[in-house]
Image: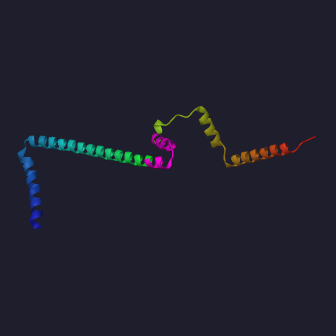
């Protein structure tokens, strides 16, 4: 243990002295080139691993879809297309800069809804119910 610590202390000091005494820039350039090459290789390995992962998941999803289709065929179930559409919509919405612009009519409707507070909404709801009752009563009553 003591030998390891001594080697670490002396080794660090020797490498610092080598860099100061050695002074030729070739080692630094070689080190930089090696580091850049290692970084490129690392990035390429990451990219390849990601591609393999995506391909694996694509194959798994294809197998799952085949199994689903077999079950649908067995029990005569129709495939729901609505689910696919709903899954695509949330993917488009997360970026607020890419959302669909609202028409002036939609903006006016939103502004009107914001202006209506709870009391006004309640008042309008009661008025509509009273009007519906009035029309029902008038329909049943016959004036002669």
What span is in magenta?
70-92
Q: Residue furthest bottom?
A: 1
Classify residue 137 as left or right of residue 79: right
| Percent x, y of residue 110 | 61, 39
| Percent x, y of residue 31 | 13, 44
| Percent x, y of residue 36 | 19, 41
Classify residue 87 as left or right of residue 54: right
Is residue 25 in view from this perspective?
Answer: no
Magenta segment's dominant SS is: helix
When asked about the image quadrant of residue 105, the answer is: top right
Q: What residue is drawn where x is 9% and y is 65%?
A: 3
Identify whether 1 is placed above or below 76: below
Q: Nearer the viewer, residue 134 or 115?
A: 134
Is residue 49 in view from this perspective?
Answer: yes
Quadrant containing the N terminus is bottom left
Q: Residue furthest top?
A: 104
Q: Nearer the viewer, residue 104 or 6?
A: 104
Q: Is residue 10 magenta?
A: no
Q: What residue is drawn where x is 34% and y is 45%?
A: 59
Q: Is residue 80 magenta?
A: yes
Count of numbered labels shown in the rendering: 0
Q: Nearer the viewer, residue 89 or 36?
A: 89
Coloured how?
rainbow
Quadrant containing the C terminus is top right
Q: Residue furthest left?
A: 21
Classify residue 137 as left or right of residue 11: right
Q: Residue furthest front?
A: 74
Q: What residue is drawn where x is 15% and y is 43%?
A: 34
């Amino acid at each position: 243990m003591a030998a390891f610590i001594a080697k670490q202390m002396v080794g660090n000091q020797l490498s610092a002295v080598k860099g100061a005494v050695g002074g030729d820039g070739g080692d630094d350039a070689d080190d930089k080139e090696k580091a850049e090459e290692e970084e490129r290789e690392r990035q390429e390995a990451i990219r390849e691993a990601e591609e393999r992962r995506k391909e694996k998941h694509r194959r798994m999803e294809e197998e799952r879809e085949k199994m689903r289709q077999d079950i649908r065929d067995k029990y005569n179930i129709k495939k729901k297309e609505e689910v696919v559409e709903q899954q695509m919509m949330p993917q488009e919405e997360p970026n607020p800069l890419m959302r669909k612009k609202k028409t002036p009519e939609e903006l006016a409707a939103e502004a009107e809804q914001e202006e209506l507070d709870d009391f006004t909404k309640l008042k309008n709801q009661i008025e509509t119910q009273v009007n519906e009752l009035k029309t029902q009563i008038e329909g049943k009553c016959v004036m002669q």
